[in-house]
Amino acid sequence: MQREDGFTLIEVLIAVAVMSVGVAATMRVFGAAGRTTVRAQQHEVAVQRAQAEIDRLAALAYGELALTTAPASSSDPNHPGHKVSGGNFAVRSDLTEALVLSPGAGAAAKVEPGPQTFAVGTGGGTVTGRLYRYVTWRDESCPLNLCDGAENTKRVIVALTLDPMPGVTASAPVWVSTIVVDPNTAPPGSQAPPGNAPGGGDPVTADTFYLYDTPCSHGTRQPQTGGHPTRDTAATGPDAADNSTCDHPDPDHQPDLMGGSAPPGDSSTPVFEYSSDLAGDYLGGLAMVNAGTECARSYLAEDADDPQGPSKWSVHAWSTGAMPQPYQLDGQVTLSLFTSTLAGVSGSGRLCATLVDREVTDGVPSDRPLGSAVYDLPNWPRTMRRVTFTFSLDQPDAVPSGHRLVLTLHLREESSNDVAFLYDHPLHPSLLEVATPTPL
């Protein structure tokens, strides 16, 4: 038979059809991938814009964190206003909080609810949308009545909706929020509601011990007169001269005092540095260097000035006066501390808190640990804020008459940054609360 070379017309048409199907499928994949990329870029822009707005609002004075007008509600479930109902805001399906519609005394409300239009980018890549703002009251569940009523802290909320771009499906709103604490509000330190001790014993109340910048050889808090270098409050050693005790003749070699009276003064009371020997930018109080990976309640006297391990710059102690009678500890302990990172940098913090029953004989302490806890916070406050945490002793215990109750704080090495603690100030009264059936 005569030989035929090449393709027939039918074969060419079939090949073209197959290739067309493949090219069309490939183009759909590229199109979907492009739209996914655009949506991801839009979402990233939205998160950054919302976070920037949160940071701006959080920098306002606490009294100014109030809505200038009531925000509008909406029947559209995809609209941020869908969470608004009258004067309330649905934070979650199971949590509704009252909107903050009135500023603090002497302040003006500065949170405009919106919506406010925004645009990020240039040309065809511009991302546009609307910004919504809300402020609500939080009813904190504080142990031992550290906060009363239903308006304890404020929740600042920002919602951001993006205008859809051609060919890109509209996305759900982006939500960002933060909690803001009133820096001028002091925990009352009052007794807890009447109750019964385990086993039906005496009623349990709460004793408050405010942290002072006063050496504990003094029986009462002393007026502050200025800043000073870090005191050597938690040193130990074989000789009496090595140990930081209330009996030591050098007041800079004693634990600081803690007692039952709140620091006096008002908003004009000066703030002093208790670590003037350490460099760093902070509002005031005690600066602490992170060092050591195990919870320490003391350090060797020879290491007091060594910043590489537990030292006077990473471990600090406070002591009560001698107990006039046996002091019962019911088991629940709460610490409320005003604190911030140095220089306002962001990062985590790991803080050890330890309670000790201390007896001193001939200048040498005999310490019996009562309980310890580690407080981990992924984002330590960057400005001076109050943090409060509670831990329980292993069992109810007692500090005998004549002994002292000692609190030590240790900033561990796992912390991202050095931090500061502010106390002994009327606006920043850091304190320890202890549940007890035998209040002082």
Image (spheres, grey):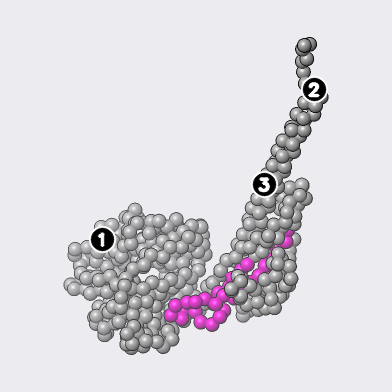
| Label 2 environment density (alpha carbons within 10 Å; few <14, some 14–19, many ≥20) | few
Magenta span has 130?
Answer: yes
- Percent position (x, y) of residue 2? 78, 11
Which circle marks residue 301 in the picture?
Answer: 1
The answer to whether one can see residue 204 in this image is yes
Label 1: which secondary element: helix
The answer to whether residue 42 is above or below residue 200 is above
> Label 3: which residue?
37
- Circle 3: residue type: Thr
> Label 2: which residue?
8
Residue range corresponding to the magenta coloring: 129-157
Quarter placement of the C terminus:
bottom left
Magenta span has 23?
Answer: no
| Left or right of residue 47, residue 432 in this image | left
| Label 1 environment density (alpha carbons within 10 Å; few <14, some 14–19, many ≥20) | many
| Left or right of residue 209, residue 73 in this image | right
The answer to whether residue 255 is above or below residue 23 is below
Which circle marks residue 139 in the picture?
Answer: none
| Label 3 environment density (alpha carbons within 10 Å; few <14, some 14–19, many ≥20) | few
Residue ranking furthest to the front: 1
Q: CA distance from mark 3 to mark 1?
A: 60 Å
Residue contact at pointers 3 and 1, CB within 8 angstroms: no
